[in-house]
Image: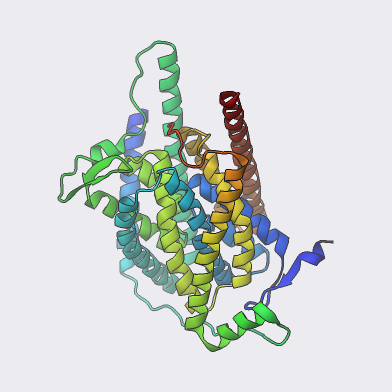
Amino acid sequence: MTGRSIARSMTALVVLAPWLLVTGTMAAGGESQGALVHVADTRHLTGFNLYFANLYNVNRLLFTAMTVGLTGLLGLSLGMLMDVIVGAIGLDLGKREAKE
Amino acid sequence: MFEWFTVALPISGVSVNALLLILLGVAVGVLGGFFGMGGAWMVTPALNIFGFPMPFAVGTDLCHMAGKSIISTRRHAKFGNVDVKLGLTMLAFDVVGIEIGARLVMWLERLGLAGPVIRWVYVVFLFLIAWLVFYDYFKERAIRRRAALGLAPGAPGLQWHVALHKISLRPIVRFDVAQVECSMWLPAAVGFFVGVLAGFLGIGGGLLMMPALVYLIGVPTFVAVGTDLFTVMLSGFYGAATYSMKGRVEILAVILMLAGAAPGAQIGTIATKYIRGYGIRLMFAITVVCAMISVILKQLGFDLAAAWVVMTAVTVMTGVVVVGMVRGAARELKAHKEVGA
């Protein structure tokens, strides 16, 4: 079997596998089960942890907004901080040579 | 001594070593920035080993992945490696695919077959990805060797995208950064199938998206990595929001992992500057093989060995990338000095 024919067989398999997966399981139906309710234990918490645990228990929407917002803000600010640190080492962070 | 670093997480109540979370963040940051993926296959089992219940492991991973991908995507964007138009086109169909994949899982769950079927499908796809990357890598090496000997180069490596670019279904779109012109339905279909698989296998999709961009759409490796990270970032935020609403994100763990991922992502991304595209592909294939072995071991009931394989692969690959980055940076700084002198 040549490399080209193996490649053809593999291509066919890659294309067919998701299709077989879909058609093979479409016949069976069903609903997912409801999620379990979880409550954060705030008895021994203070400061930041207490604030987030309370938010989690009381207002899930605000907890979501704060979590997503904080993650984005932290990612952005840490990225900028690392830019400054790596730039200070003297590496050129503005361009790269593309080599395949 | 390590007990000093033990923190009780406020939402799940799990006690975990903060140092371990930071180190995990560093490793996943390095590999994510280098390969252009979220790294769910590494983080979720690791968090599970640390004591996180599985839903918290998945939710916390997705949330940290969103923050980490901002860092890597910004860096790749500055290198000119992100094709936003291509990323958004694929993402729109990727989301639909993820939903269908997730529904397939529910159907299988009802049949009581979800666990083993998902794992074996995962193994098959990891094998296919590893096979095609290895095949392409060694083909490219053979061409180089023949060229060095002054012989005819022979058949080129995998060129599936050339045939796929002949699809003339309108609209035909040009993706400038990726330097690709094709039917819009090609990236749409690839995004959709990657989404179905990602939703079905319960992974972020970066592991599938990167080779799909390279081999099916014909995107250069560096642009594939950057564009993949861009889509991982957006899908990560969606995942973070939906898991937060379901109450399965541990925010303190996310912050600790991000603290490690920030330097890690910079190292991984900058390393792509010094390691050529085919080198990245080869390392990617080795990593995929390790992921495949780990899934097989898990399926056979060797959970500890499976976790060991993942952790070893993560540690070794992180080491290789860090060494590559440090050596490349040293060369660059030396060259700067010589120009200055």
Q: Quadrant of residue B47?
A: bottom right
Residue A56, position as x, y percentages in the image: 56, 83
For the residue pair B96 and A43, the one nearer the viewer reads as A43
Residue B179, position as x, y percentages in the image: 29, 39
Extreme residue in the right direction: B1
Q: How many marks?
A: 0
For the residue pair B310 and B37, the one nearer the viewer reads as B37
Extreme residue in the front direction: B341
Say above or below: A2 vs B322: above
Q: Quadrant of residue B286?
A: top right
Residue A1 shows in this picture: no
Residue at figure coordinates x 58%, y 33% from the top left? B328
Residue B53, position as x, y percentages in the image: 61, 72
Judge left or right: residue B115 versus residue A4: right
Where is the N terminus of chain B found, in terms of image quarters? bottom right
Residue at figure coordinates x 45%, y 38% from the top left? A95
Q: Quadrant of residue B222?
A: top left
Residue A88, position as x, y percentages in the image: 61, 44
Residue A60 shows in this picture: yes
Judge left or right: residue B143 versus residue B291: left
Residue at figure coordinates x 16%, y 51% from the top left? B171
Where is the C terminus of chain B found, in terms of image quarters? top right
For the residue pair B109 and B312, the one nearer the viewer reads as B312
Say above or below: B338 vs B130: above
